[in-house]
Image (spheres, rainbow, N blue to C red):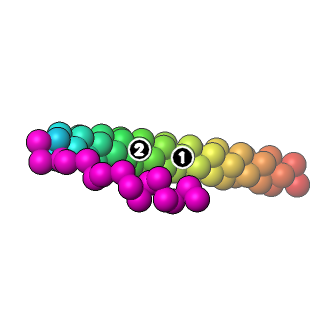
Amino acid sequence: MVAAPLGELPALPLHEAGKYVAAAYIVLFALVLVYVAIMAIRSRRLERDLGELLAREQATASQESGESQQRESTLV
């Protein structure tokens, strides 16, 4: 019953509006592309910062273990 009224509606002519629809899709695609590029840059920066923090933490941990080994050897 719902499909019958929709089948009787004429198609909208897009001969003049087609340019604007295409332009809207292009703008939307460009915006999505820019958004994805920004997120990729932020993700790369976040991974780099995380790598630096992990390296710093490992260096601190190895430095602390070296100091504790020196303390143990001086006590013996």
Residue 22 placed where, x, y %?
Answer: 19, 47
Mark 1: which amino acid? Leu
- Name the one closer to the observer, 58 or 48: 48
Circle 1 residues within 10 Å: few <14, some 14–19, many ≥20: few
Q: Residue at x 71, y 46 (%)?
A: 64
Which stretch did the figure color magenta?
1-16
Residue 26 placed where, x, y %?
Answer: 21, 46
Mark 2: which amino acid? Met
Q: Residue at x 56, y 55 (%)?
A: 2
Q: Residue at x 11, y 42 (%)?
A: 16
Judge whether residue 11 is colored magenta: yes
Of labels 1 and 2, earlier in sequence is 2
Residue 51 placed where, x, y %?
Answer: 51, 50
18 lies left or right of 2: left
Label number found at residue 39: 2
Which residue bears the numbered disc 1?
Answer: 50
69 lies left or right of 63: right
Circle 2 residues within 10 Å: few <14, some 14–19, many ≥20: few
Disc 1 secondary structure class: helix
Give the dominant element type of the magenta stretch: helix, strand or loop. Answer: loop
Judge whether residue 74 is colored magenta: no
